[in-house]
Amino acid sequence: MEKMKKQADGAIVKRQTIVKVSLAKEKNCINQLYTDNNEKVQAKAIIIATGALSKDLGLESEERLKGYGVSSCAICDGFLYKDKVVAVVGGALEETIYLSKICKIVYLLVRSGASKAMQCRLWKISNLKIYFSHEIKEILGERFVEGVRIINNQKESILSIDGIFIAIGQIPNTAIFRGNLDKMG
C-alpha cells in the first residue's frame, strides 16, 4: 500500500468526462486529454479504465424496460428477484447458476446449442429450464417486465417472467481512443 501511495503522490483527480484524446507517439512525451468543459489536461502517463458496455438485443421493448425488469448484470441486480421467475439470454453460465440459487425459476434462452459438458452441468439444476435454439422476439410488459415472446422453428410461445438478464456480450468502451491505441507500440 505504501508503494501504491508513493506512486500516486502528486496525481490529480478530476471529475470530468474526457471527450477526446491525443496520445503521445513516443516515450516521455506528453499526452493531451480534452474534457467536456473544454479543458485540456496534459499527462505523461494515462491509465485507461473505461470499462465496457453490455450488448443489447436491439428491441424497442428492451430499451423501454431497462431498469424495470431488464438488466445486464445478474450479480448486481439478481437479489431484486429473490424467489421470482427470471430469464437469462445468452450463454452466461456463472450468472445463470448464481440466479438459480436465489430465484424460483430460471429460464436460460440460448440461440444455438451447447457443449455436452455445459449441458450436463446445467441439467443438474432443478429450477433451471433451458431453451436451446430460441430467440427473443419481444419483451412483454407496460411498466415492468411481465413476460417474453420467444420463437423456435417459426413457433412462438410466451414465458411469464418477472425479470430478464441480457448476457450476450460486451463492447469495450474505448471509442475515444479509436485511431490512437492501434498506433502505440
Image (cartoon, helix red, strand yellow):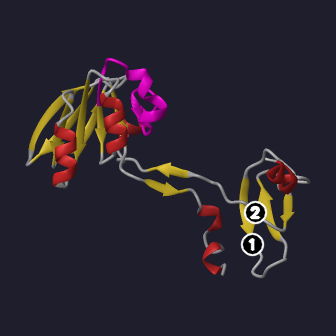
Q: Nearer the viewer, residue 119 or 33?
A: 119
Q: Amino acid at mark 1?
A: Leu
Q: Position of residue 184 (x, y in %)?
A: 66, 78
Q: Amino acid at mark 2?
A: Ile
Mark 2 surroundings within 10 Å by alpha-carbon count, few (fewer than 14), some (14 through 19), many (20 or more): few
Circles 1 and 2: CB atoms closer than 8 Å: yes
Q: Nearer the viewer, residue 19 or 119?
A: 119
Q: Can you tell which of label 1 and label 2 is closer to the viewer?
A: 2
Q: Is residue 55 visible?
A: yes
Q: For mark 1, what is the residue? A: 23
Q: Is residue 113 visible?
A: no
Verify whether residue 25 appears in magenta.
Answer: no
User: Left or right of 53: which side holds 151?
Assistant: left
Q: Nearer the viewer, residue 18 or 112?
A: 112
Mark 1 surroundings within 10 Å by alpha-carbon count, few (fewer than 14), some (14 through 19), many (20 or more): many
Q: Position of residue 175 (x, y in %)?
A: 59, 62
Q: Residue furthest top?
A: 83
Residue at horizontal 12 percent and vertical 38 percent from the top: 156
The image quarter containing residue 38 is bottom right
Up-down relation of residue 152 to residue 99 (above or below): below
The image quarter containing residue 155 is top left
Q: Residue furthest front?
A: 2
Q: For mark 2, what is the residue? A: 46
Residue at horizontal 30 percent and vertical 42 percent from the top: 89
